[in-house]
Image (cartoon, helix red, strand yellow):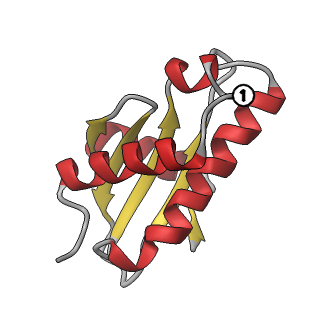
Amino acid sequence: MEKLVKNNEFQKVYNFGKKSYGYYALIFFMKNNLEYNRCGFVASKKIGNAVCRNRIKRLFRECYRCNEENLKTGYDLIFVGKKNAGEKFKELKYQEMENDIKKILKKAGLIAG
């Protein structure tokens, strides 16, 4: 998995990309004209403390890693945690997060096949 690192890469996706919502997350995506996907994972301070934000980002990374082979390639993706995820991060199970992410990706048309 390639990462989006630079601020201008994030800004380009935020400003020119499309977005798709779910209950726990919001995904910004944009074509990148490469043969692979690049990802960014964001959890702002509004969501909760550092423990909460890190758990949310770990869940995002794991959801992406497990579903990577089903995704269309050539996109920049940014996974953004919503306040709902932060409020119940202690009880939040991986399966709930994965189902939400899959639903968002399907709605966005990013799942191949």
Residue 28: % across, % down: 36, 44
Give the farthest residue toward the bottom. 35
**Horizontal relation, residue 40 to residue 20: left or right:** right
Q: Image quadrant for the C terminus?
A: bottom left
Q: Does the rendering let one see residue 75?
A: yes
For disc 1, the marked residue is 90
Query: As displayed, is residue 87 above or below residue 40?
Result: above
**Horizontal relation, residue 79 to residue 60: left or right:** left
Q: What is the three-letter code of the residue carrying label 1?
A: Lys
Q: Residues within 10 Å of mark 1 (few under 14, many from 20)?
A: few
Q: For mark 1, give the secondary structure.
A: loop
Q: Residue at x 57, y 74 (%)?
A: 1
Query: As displayed, is residue 31 above or below residue 46?
Result: below
Q: Residue at x 82, y 31 (%)?
A: 51
Q: Residue at x 17, y 58 (%)?
A: 109
Q: Residue at x 74, y 29 (%)?
A: 52
**Horizontal relation, residue 73 to residue 42: left or right:** left
Query: As displayed, is residue 78 above or below residue 33?
Result: above
Is 63 or 91 nearer to us in this picture? 91
Residue 10: % across, % down: 49, 46
